[in-house]
Amino acid sequence: MTCRLHAALRPLLAVVTAAVAVAAPAAFPAAAAAHPLGNFTVNHQTTVSVSADRVDVSYILDKAEIPTFQARGLTPAEVLGATRREVGQRLVVAVGGRRTRLALAPGGRVTYPRGQGGLDTTRVELRGVVRVRDARRVTVRDGTFPDRLGWKAVIAAPGSGTATRSDVPASDPTDGLRRYPADLLSSPSDVRDALLTVAPGAGTLQAPDGRRTTGEEADRSGDGFAGVFDRARDGDGIFLLLLLAAFAWGALHALSPGHGKTMVAAYLIGRRGRPRHALALGLIVTVTHTAGVFALGLVTLALSAYILPEQLYPWLNLVSGLLVVGIGLSVLRSRVRWGRDRRAEQARNAAPPAPHGHDHAQAHDHAQAHNHAQAHDHAQAHGHDHAQAHGHDHAQAHGHDHAQAHGHAHGGHGHSHDIPDELSRRTLVAMGMSAGLVPCPSALVVLLAALSQHEIVLGLILIVAFSAGLAGTLSAIGLAVVKMRGYTSRVSFSGRLSAAVPALSTLLIVGLGLVLTARAVPGVS
């Protein structure tokens, strides 16, 4: 059965691989439309310069696609007004230790640069001033949008008639949040406060080159997926190739950190999984990931006033980690139980047999023809007691050999000495859920874009294809593991090494779950 399944899958995998290669040109150019820091981010930058009689403040806000979508019901004037209130309340400028009033200049500028999937992003620019006299120490604290992920920077600029020393850099690597440097995307700036010491001078500034970063990292492995939606919506390209491109982006997303690749491999090794288990796992991942995208879309549409979608990701990661820990502990418990039962069985087998005799005093009937393969004489008394009369047939040899550990009967019931290795349906579902529970942000962008542009069917088809690509990678890993285990089973290993593999795989699953849980905890605390 396994060989036939592998033979059937081989051409399918070859066709999919070739098709994805053909579809790649349709997929990868689309990645440029992605917001560099991720679709959930709210980025802001404050630039401060201190002159002899004033402190000038410039504030820039850059919202990615999903926060912009959440504010889709607001007019530009309302967006500007909300931003002015946020800055007025949370951007604090203190001179000589005393908080001052930041007077924002009238108006401001709101624009909507195009982002992923045909969705807009938001850019707001404001200016403000604080009137001072002979300022010597100026502190700035940017507390705007404290709960949102993104690039946060405070930059110093030279003033007029002063010599300023700053503890924040003067350079702006983003050109006013227009271009984010690729080498900083994995660890975006997290500077929210600044101290400027001022003396009379000729407009000079002394500032460090320092780079303060945060551990937040945007998952960009699926960014080009929204570009595939753009092309499919506009009819730009053959739909089948675009569908395969969505599949390819899902497969690429699965290769990014996480998604249970190590867990799947360890579990299928330790529990002797079969190809059907790997394929079933892929189906569960597809359903789970697609359902997760739609659930998160529902939260974004209906509950965004109460729950920020990006705040759900740490909780989803925590649940995923706990599921993996639970799977590992379940496997560990079954192995401990099996070990206990095996030791008890060995103890019973080691006990000396109770003495028993055979006595033929009571008749037993040899009327039926039977063949004694080895001649033996009943004339000799052989004292074994047949207290109950019984007929028996020696025509069939009924010896049994305990030289190899295999299933045999004791006391009327059979049992096996093999390690329990059958994958339970419940555990398989838990594995698939843990691998597909955290939806890709780009898939959410495609869903929201499809809803806003009345292309729901197209969005659903592409999301399912993307989820299938994610699941296909995990299934391929599972099939490779099963096949590899089939090859290695023909190689002779020492008994201890062979026995240690299941135990090590169990410990690996538990350890992986603990790592995932530990990484998720700071985000929910």
Image: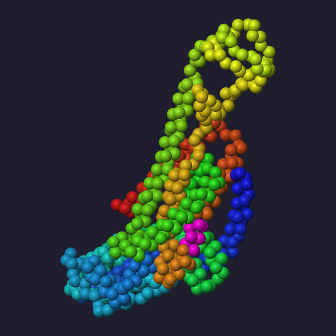
Residue farthest to the bottom? 106
At x 34%, y 83%, the residue is 59
- Residue 247 locus on image (x, y percent): 61, 70
Q: Quadrant of residue 235?
A: bottom right
Above or below, 37 relative to 215? below
Which quarter of the figure is the C terminus placed in? bottom left
* Nearer-the-camera pick, 426 or 196: 426
Q: Is residue 1 above or below residue 126?
A: above
Magenta highlight on residue 490: no
Quarter where residue 72 is shown: bottom left
- Asked if one can make out residue 145 in the rendered structure from this viewpoint, the answer is yes
Task: Name the residue rendered at 25%, 87% in the picture.
Answer: 103
- Which stretch appears magenta? 461-470
Residue 417 versus residue 281 in the image, above or below: above
State the image coordinates of residue 69 (x, y, percent, origin top left). 42, 80
Predominant SS along the magenta part: helix
* Magenta stretch contains residue 462: yes
- Name the residue furthest top: 380
Q: Would you say 126 lies left or right of 260 here?
A: left
